[in-house]
């Protein structure tokens, strides 16, 4: 933040305005919102209170803490990383360096998963989330469907610790089985009513060109899908049919422009589309696949 904010007894509204301008000058797309969220969190209040208390003086300690946060945001660090948490499916998830910041479009996996598990399945349906990260999808399913048996896996032990911590904080401890390992390795021989995954689907070139807040602050192994973005997707589809029970489905999130290539790969693996679902921007985002189902 500018040196002008370093003097004592700066008013809240003045500081907020300077911070928003500072972030805007450095290219932040949501400069005002970011400045508000970071200050409201620091002061433990809601954003409305910032305007009601716009004449309130800030202490030196508050100013110092806010300057640090604004400097981190100006350097490209995402707001969620600075706060150490992100809301997903109306749940507050804690984050660690080993997990992706959950994206809003991934909530489509939850929506579609709930529709599948609430359908004509036996009591106590089973679901497997691969690459669970912070645990958002698995925990959302567990919260919404107490009778379901949910398993979440990840190749990162630190990511699984983060997911387990979130389960405890959300009073969902014991509702999800957490297993360490690569894709289906921890569940060898088991079949599920539903398998879900948000795999790494950026091409290596796309990742190199991604904004700093993605390239420098999200775990690379959760983003880099190889030369065409489909390295992990190929393995998921190849191994997936062997882990789907009768009437089961595989839900896979995909990147922009990957629907056709992914459907070709799925067909080669004996999986056919039961649905191609678009996100709020109208982009095909989740493929719903079944074993042996026609188009």
Image (spheres, helix red, strand yellow):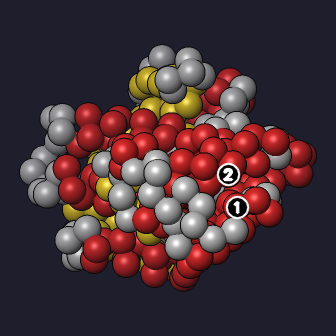
* Residue 30 horizontal/vertical position (percent): 64, 38
Choose top left, top right, bottom left or bottom right for residue 260: top right
Residue density around tag 2, few if under 14, some if 14–19, many if 20 or more, within 10 Å: many
In primary-sequence order, the first of circles 2 and 1 is 1
- Whether 74 is drawn above or below 229: the answer is below
State the separation of the CA atoms marked 2 and 1: 9 Å
Q: Residue at x 51, y 37 (%)?
A: 105
Q: How crowded is mark 1: few (under 14 residues within 10 Å), some or many (20 or more)?
A: some
Residue 147 versus residue 186: which sits nearer the camera?
147
Give the secondary structure at mark 1: helix
The answer to which of 14 and 259 lies nearer the viewer is 14
Residue contact between numbered discs 2 and 1, judged by CB atoms under 8 Å: yes
Question: Measuring 45% from the left and 57% from the top, which residue is drawn there?
Answer: 56
| Circle number at residue 71 | none
Front residue (pair 195, 41): 41
* Residue 140 pos. (x, y %): 30, 53
Q: Name the residue under label 2.
A: 19
User: Which residue is found at the position 56% from the left and 78% from the top?
Assistant: 61
Q: Is residue 294 left or right of residue 20?
A: left
Q: Which mark is residue 5?
A: 1
Label 2 vs label 1, nearer the camera? 1
Residue in the image at 45% along x and 81% along y? 161
One can see residue 196 in this view: no
- In percent of width and height, residue 181 lies at 54, 76
Q: In this rendering, does residue 168 appear at all?
A: yes
């Amino acid at each position: 933040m500018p040196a002008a904010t370093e003097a004592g007894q700066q008013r809240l509204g003045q500081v907020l305005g300077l911070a928003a301008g500072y972030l805007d000058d450095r290219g932040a797309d949501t400069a005002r919102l970011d400045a508000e969220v970071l200050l409201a969190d620091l002061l433990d209040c809601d954003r409305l209170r910032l305007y009601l208390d716009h004449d309130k003086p800030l202490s030196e300690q508050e100013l110092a803490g806010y300057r640090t946060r604004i400097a981190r945001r100006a350097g490209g660090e995402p707001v969620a990383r600075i706060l150490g948490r992100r809301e997903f499916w109306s749940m507050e998830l804690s984050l660690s360096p080993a997990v992706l910041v959950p994206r809003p479009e991934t909530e489509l996996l939850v929506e579609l998963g709930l529709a599948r598990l609430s359908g004509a399945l036996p009591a106590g349906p089973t679901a497997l989330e691969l690459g669970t990260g912070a645990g958002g999808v698995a925990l959302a399913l567990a919260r919404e469907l107490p009778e379901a048996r949910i398993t979440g896996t990840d190749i990162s032990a630190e990511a699984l610790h983060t997911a387990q911590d979130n389960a405890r904080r959300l009073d969902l401890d014991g509702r999800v089985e957490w297993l360490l390992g690569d894709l289906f390795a921890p569940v060898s021989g088991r079949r599920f009513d539903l398998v879900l995954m948000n795999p790494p689907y950026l091409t290596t070139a796309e990742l190199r060109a991604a904004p700093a807040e993605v390239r420098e602050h999200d775990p690379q192994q959760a983003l880099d899908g190889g030369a065409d973005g489909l390295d992990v997707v190929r393995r998921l589809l190849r191994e997936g049919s062997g882990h789907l029970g009768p009437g089961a489905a595989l839900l896979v999130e995909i990147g922009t422009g990957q629907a056709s290539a992914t459907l070709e790969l799925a067909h080669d693996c004996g999986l056919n589309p039961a649905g191609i679902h678009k996100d709020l921007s109208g982009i095909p985002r989740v493929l719903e696949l079944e074993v042996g189902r026609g188009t």
